[in-house]
Image (tube, helix red, strand yellow):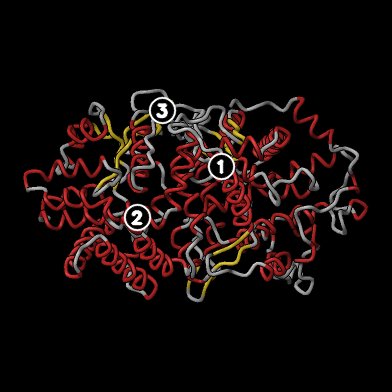
């Protein structure tokens, strides 16, 4: 979808809200949740959310529970109704409706899955076990062709230097525990996770029919290989350096530097494409480690690693024994105490296989055109506001501002749902096959869809999320911001809510995604989505100096005793939160000025609060979340987003309009002296 100019749609939207004035009422904020014993200037997050936190205690099912979870629950309930209604219509075999219903039904049929046990994967495990030494090269290729990625990962993606075409990328394989620190650090937390992972491997291999002795040997060999790979895997902070991940190699260089793989056979036989002339290597160090290590390993060690890779990817589609083993590991990782209900897990699997088919049903029933129209106008108001912020920056040169405005003007906006839907007609789903076999077929369909992109122009209409996903994103390679239908619900968006709530909710989210185009990662890409250094060196230095101040603000926060937030790893999201708040407030002020409303005036109060107060109140309301300590540790290790309380309290302490709205003054905990505030956008 081409980004729309600020024309009649946006103007009509602004005009349509004229005259509401003091007749507005709160719809997304429950004032009963506000704790008046806590001053907003002392702890704004808790002041607004304490009642909500008390009213939504964590259940055994959740490691964390917040406003996003409430919307996800709503979306899940809607999707469940849609999918179960499909079954009631007895859809014709071969239709997409029949495929959706079949996957869901098989996922729900635990009696059949328990009876089958590990049977659906035994033939493949036997193939791994019985491969002779001379067949190990072909076994490596077969593993990569069956939705596992031992030692390396490869696939086409938009070329970061020319985003209109696909490049072939080569990377290190994902680590089973996700982060390198779990393998390398010996503190109490990392040791506990590592021991739980070892237990998971051994348990799953015994579930697959192996003896305790064999399972222990497999565990040891997996840990040997994954730990060696972890040592040379990028750190969390290094992984944010996008230019450092763009390393073009000729195929001759790839063959020389990483000789353990037969690259011609890999591309031709595994991907079904001609060997590329150029390959982008994202992490040469870990790939070199893998290539050096592979010839030194025995066939037994490699097979054990492959066995775990295969069982790991299959485990969620097999019997309850496999499911419970995964859950026991998740308990250590996140602190969750109870398995998610079967229907929720079944829906997630169905959406993973046929997400846009389900999304089409969702949009038809739950996303009116009026919501899309409102969002189009809101986005354009935010675009204008961000343009004003860029023009007024005191740290950016005029030449860079010009390029920034060009990029902003070129934003593509996607709202609600794709303009064209995926065609699942060629996906093989058969109720006579096991659940695992059907899910494997679905995975192979998606893998083939990805490989088929090679050699074709990039499809800019494609979405990276389904419409029923409660989220939003910015894609730098397409210079686009995307808002799925499911996030357009209260407290983010409500056509019956006050302007202040909508601007403090979805307005901030829009601004957040827009400013991602100019954060520590997004600034590496130009208006066309190509990785280009379009900043002057002086601008980059000034930006990085400001960013250091924001990093320090988050680094100083102790999220648990002895554990601090990671300001460097969360920098992009923290910049976007602050930018989203500032830009959304500017757009909100403009919308209210056109109505003759002073957002700080007592005469403009909405149910007892000024519009400016309501704006910040709903922003805080978005991030109300109860979180287990284990999950806090896990998120601090592996999530680029700050915890909800810090997205509110740390971010707002930089904003003078927030202080003005709540009369926050020096001496109060939320107050930050002007000289210490960091303003980027």
In front of the other: 374 or 94: 94
Q: Which residue is mark 1?
A: 88
The disc placed on residue 590 is none
Which mark is in front, 3 or 1?
1
Query: What residue lies at 70% left-to-right and 35% top-to-bottom?
Result: 368
Query: What residue lies at 58% left-to-right and 50% top-to-bottom?
Result: 76
In front of the other: 651 or 456: 456
Relative to 189, 404 lies left or right: right
Q: Secondary structure at mark 3?
A: strand
Which mark is in front, 2 or 3?
2
Query: What residue lies at 60% left-to-right and 47% top-to-bottom?
Result: 81
Q: How many marks?
A: 3
Identify the mark nearer the N-term, 3 or 1: 1
Considering the image in quadrants, where does the C terminus appear? top right
Q: Which residue is mark 2?
A: 318
Q: CA distance from mark 2 to mark 1?
A: 26 Å
Residue 250 lies, with reference to residue 49, above or below; the image says above
User: Hey, which residue is sitting farthest right in the picture?
Assistant: 603
Q: Can residue 145 be seen in the rendering of this structure?
A: yes
Residue 129 in the image: state x and y as whole percent: 14, 53
Q: CA distance from mark 2 to mark 3?
A: 42 Å
Q: Which residue is mark 3?
A: 162
């Amino acid at each position: 979808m081409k980004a729309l100019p600020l024309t009649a749609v946006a103007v009509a939207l602004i005009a349509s809200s004229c005259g509401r004035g003091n007749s507005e009422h709160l719809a997304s904020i429950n004032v009963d949740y506000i704790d008046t014993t806590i001053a907003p200037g002392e702890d704004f997050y808790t002041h607004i959310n304490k009642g909500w936190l008390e009213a939504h205690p964590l259940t055994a099912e959740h490691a964390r529970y917040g406003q996003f979870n409430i919307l996800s629950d709503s979306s899940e309930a809607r999707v469940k109704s849609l999918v179960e209604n499909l079954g009631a219509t007895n859809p014709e075999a071969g239709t997409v409706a029949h495929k959706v219903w079949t996957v869901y039904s098989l996922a729900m049929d635990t009696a059949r899955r328990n009876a089958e046990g590990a049977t659906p994967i035994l033939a493949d495990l036997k193939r791994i076990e019985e491969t002779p030494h001379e067949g190990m090269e072909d076994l490596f290729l077969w593993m990569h062709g069956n939705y596992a990625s031992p030692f390396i990962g490869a696939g086409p993606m938009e070329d970061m230097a020319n985003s209109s075409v696909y490049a072939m990328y080569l990377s290190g394989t994902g680590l089973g525990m996700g982060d390198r620190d779990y393998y390398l650090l010996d503190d109490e937390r990392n040791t506990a996770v590592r021991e739980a992972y070892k237990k998971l491997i051994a348990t799953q291999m015994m579930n697959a029919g192996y003896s305790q002795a064999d399972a222990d040997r497999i565990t040891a060999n997996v840990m040997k290989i994954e730990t060696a790979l972890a040592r040379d895997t990028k750190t969390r902070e290094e992984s944010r350096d996008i230019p450092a991940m763009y390393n073009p190699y000729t195929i001759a260089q790839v063959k020389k530097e990483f000789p353990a793989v037969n690259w011609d056979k890999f591309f031709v036989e595994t991907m079904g494409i001609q060997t590329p002339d150029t390959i982008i290597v994202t992490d040469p160090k870990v790939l070199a480690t893998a290539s050096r290590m592979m010839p030194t390993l025995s066939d037994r060690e490699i097979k054990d690693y492959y066995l775990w890779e295969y069982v790991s990817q299959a485990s969620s589609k097999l019997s309850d024994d496999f499911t419970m083993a995964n859950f026991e590991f998740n308990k250590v990782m996140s602190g969750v105490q109870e398995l998610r209900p079967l229907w929720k897990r079944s829906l997630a699997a169905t959406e993973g296989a046929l997400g846009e088919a389900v999304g089409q049903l969702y949009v038809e029933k739950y996303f009116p055109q009026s919501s899309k129209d409102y969002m189009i106008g809101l986005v354009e108001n935010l675009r204008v506001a961000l343009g004003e912020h860029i023009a007024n920056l005191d740290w950016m040169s005029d030449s860079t501002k010009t390029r920034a405005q060009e990029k902003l003007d070129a934003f593509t906006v996607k709202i609600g749902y794709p303009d064209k839907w995926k065609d699942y007609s060629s996906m093989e789903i058969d109720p006579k096959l096991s659940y695992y076999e059907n899910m494997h077929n679905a995975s192979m369909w998606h893998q083939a869809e990805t490989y088929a992109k090679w050699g074709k122009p990039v499809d800019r209409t494609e979405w990276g999320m389904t419409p029923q996903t409660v989220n939003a994103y910015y894609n730098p390679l397409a210079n686009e911001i995307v808002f799925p239908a499911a996030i357009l619900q209260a407290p983010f968006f409500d056509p019956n809510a006050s302007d202040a709530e909508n601007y403090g909710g979805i307005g901030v989210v829009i601004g957040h995604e827009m400013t991602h185009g100019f954060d520590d990662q997004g600034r590496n890409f130009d208006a066309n989505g190509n990785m280009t250094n379009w900043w002057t060196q002086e601008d980059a230095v000034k930006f990085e100096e400001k960013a250091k101040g924001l990093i320090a603000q988050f680094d100083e926060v102790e999220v648990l005793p002895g554990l601090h937030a990671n300001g460097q790893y969360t920098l992009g999201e923290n910049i976007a939160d602050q930018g989203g708040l500032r830009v959304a407030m500017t757009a909100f002020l403009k919308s209210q000025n056109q109505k003759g409303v002073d957002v700080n005036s007592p005469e403009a109060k909405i149910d007892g609060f000024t519009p400016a107060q309501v704006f910040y109140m709903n922003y805080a309301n978005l991030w109300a979340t109860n979180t287990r300590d284990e999950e806090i540790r896990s998120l601090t290790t592996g999530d680029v987003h700050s915890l909800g309380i810090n997205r509110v309290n740390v971010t707002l302490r930089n904003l003078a309009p927030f202080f003005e709205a709540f009369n926050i003054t020096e001496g109060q905990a939320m107050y930050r002296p002007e000289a210490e505030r960091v303003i980027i956008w």
